[in-house]
Image: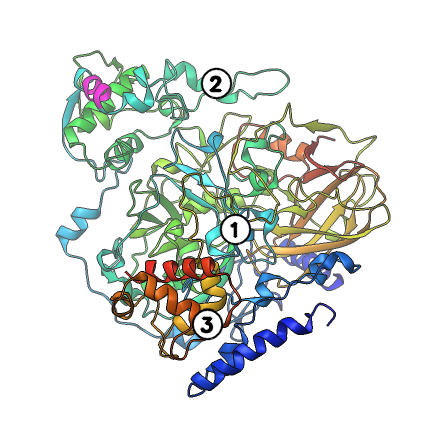
Amino acid sequence: MTKLSNASASETIASGRRDFFKKSAAFSVSAMAAATLVDPVKVDAKELKGDPAILEEKPWGTTFGYPVTHNRYGQPSPYEHHVTRRNTKLLSSGNWYASIAMCPIQDLEGIITPNGLFFSRCHGGVAEIDPNQHRLMIHGLVEKTLVLTMDELKRYPSVSRIHFIECPANGGPEWRGPQFPSIQFAKGMMSCAEWTGVYIKDIIKDLGLKPEARWMLAEGADNSHMGRTIPIDKVLDDAMIVWAQNGEALRPEQGYPIRLLVPGWEGNLCVKWLCRLEFASEPFYAKEETAKYTALKPSGKAIQHFYANEVNSVITSPCPEKPWTDLKKGDIVEIEGLAWSGMGTIEGVDISFDGGKNWVEAKLKGLVLPKAWTRFSYVFKWEGKPLLLSSRARDDAGHIQPTVKQEREVMGVESVYHRNAIHTWEVTAKGEVNNVQVLS
Amino acid sequence: MFKSYRKAILSVALLAAGTTVLFAEGASRTYANGKKVIDGGVTYPVKNGMTSLYHVNEEAHKAHFKLGRPATPDEIKAWDIDVMPDGTGLPEGHGTVEEGDEIYEEKCAACHFDFGAGGAGYPALQKGNAYEGQKSLTNQRVDGNDEGPIRVFGTYWPRASTLWWYIKTGMPHPHPMSLTDNEVYALCAYIISLNELKIDGEELDEEYELNREKFLKLEMPNKDGFVPKIDGKNGLENTRKFFNDFTNYGIAPLKDPKKRCMKNCFKGKPKLARISGSGISDYIPPISNKKELPKKKEGAGAEHPGKKAYEASCAVCHATDAMGAPVVGNKKDWEKRLANGIEKVYHNAIHGINGMPPKGGTSLPDDKIKEVVDYMISQSK
């Protein structure tokens, strides 16, 4: 306890305290409270050898923190204010109402994205819906139509599942070559959360779905009235209507009070601010499934109704935002990353140090769940030599990520959506990280 | 990883035999009805109360919940706003190209520019003759070719119904659902004419009046430009077949994970593509790793000079009434003290009063104590 005080200072304070005790002894909290009245004693840390972070008294150790009545809805430390969603004008449709906010995946840990950082895409601004005035309507090719209040909806048996949601345009600006010196913009159109809601099959089993019902329109109540057509197979498999995200109500950016969740499939199919489900025998040709979200191939034919986000991965550490510039030669360092597949569960991930010419197997760590982010890890000795650091994931549906060359051979460079080719970071001798593509 | 390799190999073997695959871990290529998973992936049927690693209360999913009520016909009519290619949901109405031009100038041109040219991030509504433009869809911007495919309404969209639905429920962007059906017909007529599309062989001149019947006859140049074929009673099966043939969309099937390439996967040194220039880096806010307090906004009010000392030394007694001290935030408590003037309050704070020791037991200078008092009063008005 060398950092403690000189005796005379504490003597003075102690005598003041004694008088105080006499006068206010009736209050049982006073002893505890009075102890905190002592002013912090400054020690000249310059005389001592070591880290000022250890040697110097700190205000947070010598004064009150804020009371429990402050920040009743908790906030991150102000020192973490740089961990935030980000935008770029390139990805705005003329204004910020039909645009996207990218998730800072470089700063995330584990597989759960905090709700305030979850990537957000909207087509007509973020609607702020009064849940008391919101309804879900189910109609079309059903024997019985249905209207539910939000309270009624939440009476169905709930299911909680961890799933990523990814915009199929994630990485889409890079079909013709790398563009972003940033992982947040190269791969940040995705996030992963635990969702709570109800399987749609649990609702419609009592409505009498007609045999000719093949498609379901899901529509939002927001400005864009976003609609998408979902095949009945998915509706009867794992499609959900969710009201909660990581244990609390959905955020407005995620469709409060309810959104559709179509596990593993394109994010735009997970219609936010959901108000209507209509069953039909023919697909609906909604605006976002013809004008957008179709993948044009070199033949001139485009894939419409492109569903699952294919197996994919990216190394998150290092990355352009989290370089190795602080490492010394010979340092042991953990390479970490995220792998995901909308078609199933991650089976394994390989890592390459030479741009995909030779591969070694990384380890998976933590929970490995279907259609969820999965962490991988590899321990490496940094020798200060330039690297081309790539990752290659595979899933239990029997797929492995293609090389850039393989993917281009099938899809060309104009498909915008569903790019899942192997991603490569160039690590320079100084430890800086650049976004590159290996075309071999 | 040996176990999972074995599983995947088993999967391929069983698939080859055309059998329903159900692994101990629960992944299956087929649904309970024997059909392949429609997206080409796997599903996880509930087995022994589990789906993958999740426990399931199967009783809850068997139960019948009687919730909600049927929709009234008026409610369905109010919300059923979609318009399908066969005309379902498309109301009667009419509008001419000329009328559409006028509405466009007033309500659309601010974003989509003159003649639907688009710009500044807002989409173009035409790029000249749509029949010609449709031929550009095989363009690829590679090997120095910078002419990309033209993907606008006329050249790309497979069905005209989408246009009507889009305008009615999504436009004008700040005020969707504000156009009458006739206005939507007029705007459709204008946009169809800008794209130089013909209806029943007829070009749309200024006087051309579009109505429901004519609109349903509009055949889009790229109507056959999409795969899989989702229409008709085979729509789902076409979709299933398409996505279960992995060669259709650029993902690499992995027949045997053990045999995936691990060494010398390509010849020579890797051929690299780099970001040209500094790439796209106009990020809002700029990227930062610094753990620092946010910069105070210019013009934002500075913190009260007495706040820190109050919180550090005085709040313990003054934040609640447990000590009998005037409570910060309690207007009445402070009005009573201030009845004899602020100087008296300063004096008591510096010299002590009742249970409170001089300066509250601190060794702060008098001026600081006054600041603290000011702060406490400022918070109690």
Instruction: Name the secondary structure under disc 3.
Output: helix
Could you say where residue B98 lies in the image, as x and y percent from the top left? 18, 15
* Left or right, residue A346 beside residue A221: right
Chain designation of label 1? A
Per the rendered image, the range of residues in magenta is B100-106
Chain designation of label 3? B
For label 2, the crowd category at 10 Å Cα-Cα, with few meaning under 14, some 14 to 19 and many 20 or more, is some
Question: Which of the two residues, B67 or B215, is positioned nearer the viewer here?
Answer: B67
At horizontal 51% and vertical 75% (from top left) the residue drawn is B49
Evaluate if marks 3 and 2 touch, with contact meaning CB atoms under 8 Å apart.
no
For label 3, the crowd category at 10 Å Cα-Cα, with few meaning under 14, some 14 to 19 and many 20 or more, is some
Q: Nearer the viewer, mark 1 or mark 2?
A: 1
For the C terminus of chain B, give its image quadrant. bottom left
Instruction: Name the secondary structure under disc 1.
Output: strand
Residue type of the residue flagged with mark 1: Ser
Residue lying at the far bottom in this picture: please name it: A26
Residue type of the residue flagged with mark 2: Ser
Question: Looking at the rendered structure, which numbered label has been put on residue A191?
Answer: 1
Question: Which of the two residues, B258 or B342, is positioned nearer the viewer here?
Answer: B342
Q: Give the mark, 3 or 2, whose residue is nearer the N terminus.
A: 2
Question: Which of the two residues, A247 or A83, is positioned nearer the viewer here?
Answer: A83
Instruction: Name the secondary structure under disc 2.
Output: helix
Dominant SS of magenta comes to helix
* Left or right, residue B143 beside residue B286: right
Question: Which of the two residues, A116 or B68, is positioned nearer the viewer here?
Answer: A116
Question: Looking at the rendered structure, which numbered label has been put on residue B358?
Answer: 3
Residue type of the residue flagged with mark 3: Pro
Residue B104 higher or lower than A394, as above or below: above
Question: Looking at the rendered structure, which numbered label has been put on residue B275?
Answer: none
For the N terminus of chain B, give its image quadrant. bottom right
B139 in the magenta segment: no
